[in-house]
Amino acid sequence: MKNAVGLILNVDGEDDSLKDFLQHRSLSTLPFGGRYRLIDFTLSNMVNSGLSHIGVIGSHKYSSLVDHLGTGKEWSLSRKTQDLSILSGSNNYHIGRLIKVNLRNLQNNRGFLESTTAEHVLIATPNLVTTFDFKNAYDIHLKNDSDVTLIFKKDDPLYHLKDNDLYLDFTKNRVSGLHYKKEHSTGHFFTEMFFIKKTLLIELLDLSERTGDWDLMDMIKQNIDTLRVFGAQHTGYIKRVNCLENYMKTSMDLLEYEIMQELFLGKNSIHTKIKDNHPTLYDDPSQVSNSIVGSGCTIDGTINHSIIFRDTHMNFGSHIQNSIIMQRCEIGRNVNLNYVVMDKDTKISDHTTLVGKPHAPIVLKKGTVI
Amino acid sequence: MNTECVAMLLAGGQGSRLGSLTFNNAKPAVLFGGKYRIIDFPLSNCMNSDIDIVGVLTQYRPYILNNYIGDGSAWALDQVQGGVHILPPYMGQKGGRWYSGTADAIYQNLDFIDRFDPEYVLILSGDHIYKMDYSKMLAFHKKKEADLTIAVMDVPWEDAHRFGIVNTDEEHCIKEFQEKPEHPKSNKASMGIYIFTWKELKRALLEDAGDRESEHDFGHNVIPALHANEKRIYAYPYSGYWRDVGTVQSYYDANMDLLDVNCDFDLSDRNFRVFSNNTSRHPQFIGPQAKIRNSLICDGCIIFGKVENSILSHDIVIHKKTSLKNVIVHTGAIIEDGAILENCIVGARARIKGDARYITDTTDTTPEIHVINS
């Protein structure tokens, strides 16, 4: 895919239910799946599909993104032939509907687009949990001489739909219409991943600077008759994490072996920042079942149907189920947790019981001590 | 960059007493404690001792070892000018030859050490499991104004006959060497860790290289020659965990020490970390029916069976209805439905069939540890 560059957006607007996690980080670096950050999926998919120049647009909460991506070494993006650019986002404000692809974010980053000789840009959001090879979609894009090729999922809503979510209308294999959720559903959901010709993207960027309308998808929707827009189908597992309930559900999906297999055991792996931890020690007696466990943990207690991140320490007599425990948490003795999400560096003292609900888990902010 | 002391790590040995564990792999690159390789211990010690320049002498089956060491960044040894250097045997104008002994390996790399012009040279080997701050040993060496300092530790008297034993005076000055003595006069055993004052080492190596009778070995030739020449040789007393993992049994026992709550060797100690070269893997997946007790497990494992008192390296798949007890499993092995394993080592990428039964005869008090490779 030498003739394409990747561009990972930041997500406009954050759901209130996630605000406890997003005080110091953007959605792209929300910890997920025992050792990952959400952006690892999109970034690894791009790298594994053969893209060698990738730009990531950060939000104003940069430090966690920069800390996580570093030089891009873990994604093989710190070579002379392959690189990662961390780009600045803009301070977006919005009235009414959130903008899915906000061209304001690209306004500051024209240099990234102009300096590349690539003719196509692959744009994707950082909060999609999926493994996807873009090669097939790229072939469709080239074969049809498309201006835009939208990747869609059939019949399966990936997420809690929002007002700005789009459906595709097809006439033969060409996309003949785009609709918002409110209008009507065609069963073809836009996955927030698409190829676009770079010249068109720059043209539309110029246009939006004149008109003040920054919504790229809306511009494509308005001009659907004159643009060559095609669709490429995603047939595998894909979920979008955009609220707490979805975060919980998508995390727990990983405990189903088939989904775990599809996401992590295929020929391409999801890369993430490497930590050099000791192997996880399962003490005697510990009882762990149906769970995902990161490295560097010591576990002394019972864990069921939960996700335990790296470097977590759990003491004797404690019982965790249906919960997500992020990095470097300490859990005392005889603690009982059910439907709890603990952000990083949280400590729970002995004999504490916390019980949330499946749709409304208890969230403990980063660094909380109870 | 600290050029006061250069470390030379002897990593060329075959380790034939480890049997099939070293068929395709040099001993220092053999897996230990799940994710580690034996060489992680001396390299991490160097890092924790502020030693910035390490030459690694390789010879036997070096591919995995070289690949593993890489640019040394895993141990913070990726400096611009210093860092880790892999030193294989090489061709010169008069031809080339293999390293014929530990001293010869260093002798052939005198140029390498001279480039850095250090005051001292630390000689390490790649077959011991221990944590040691070499900077303390170096301070001892300087304080004693020694030409050579040998790290020693007290071993049980009944085991002393298996070691190189040193007899010292009250000032730790070594008066006598006894190699595997029938009647040991002390229980201070050499740990195979030496600090030489560079100019003395260089002189001794040049002399040794000219000696046709010599086997070019530190223990047998170079150190006795220094002793005979009445050089200042001191014993640096070390106490703490140290194991030679030269045989299958000692390798197995040292691994199992990690699961023993009474053993003070702690890999999770943040104050003295043991580093290793990691690649990205998915977290452990523990299936609904899995049972895990007292075990060390690494990333990339998928477990549906019963695992007890065992050490699992990366990317291992344990299918359901299996039972593992006191087992060490190396990277990428697959244990199929129904297999029962006890007291054994499963080699890298081995596939153990479901009808496999390795069960220890309880009447046998010292069962032999099997290494299973298929």
Image (cartoon, coloured by chain):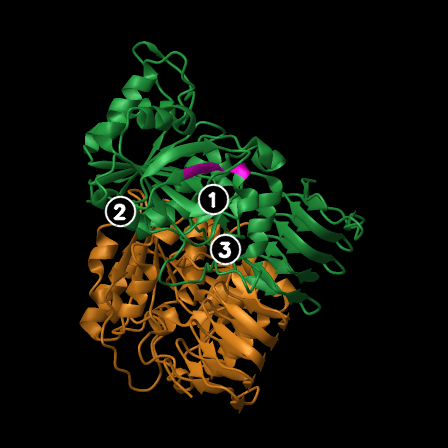
Chain colours: A orange, B green
Q: Chain of mark 2?
A: B
Residue hosting label 1: B187
Image quarter where the C terminus of chain B lies is top right
Mark whose residue sits in front, 1 or 3? 1
Q: CA distance from mark 1 to mark 2?
A: 21 Å
The mark that comes first in sequence, 1 or 3, is 1
The answer to whether dots 2 and 3 both sit on one chain is yes
The mark that comes first in sequence, 2 or 3, is 2
- Which residue is situated farthest in the top direction here? B94
Checking the image for residue B281, the label placed there is: 3
**Residue drawn at point x = 35 percent, y = 73 percent:** A11
Residue hosting label 2: B140
Residue A259 left/right relative to B96: right
**Residue drawn at point x = 66 percent, y = 52 percent:** B327
Q: CA distance from mark 2 to mark 3?
A: 43 Å
Q: Residues within 10 Å of mark 3 (few under 14, many from 20)?
A: many
Task: From the top left corner, tell me how far across and down residue A361 is, in percent.
Answer: 51, 86
Secondary structure beneath dot 3 equals: loop
Secondary structure beneath dot 1 equals: loop
As shown in the figure, which amino acid type bears the numbered disc 3? Arg
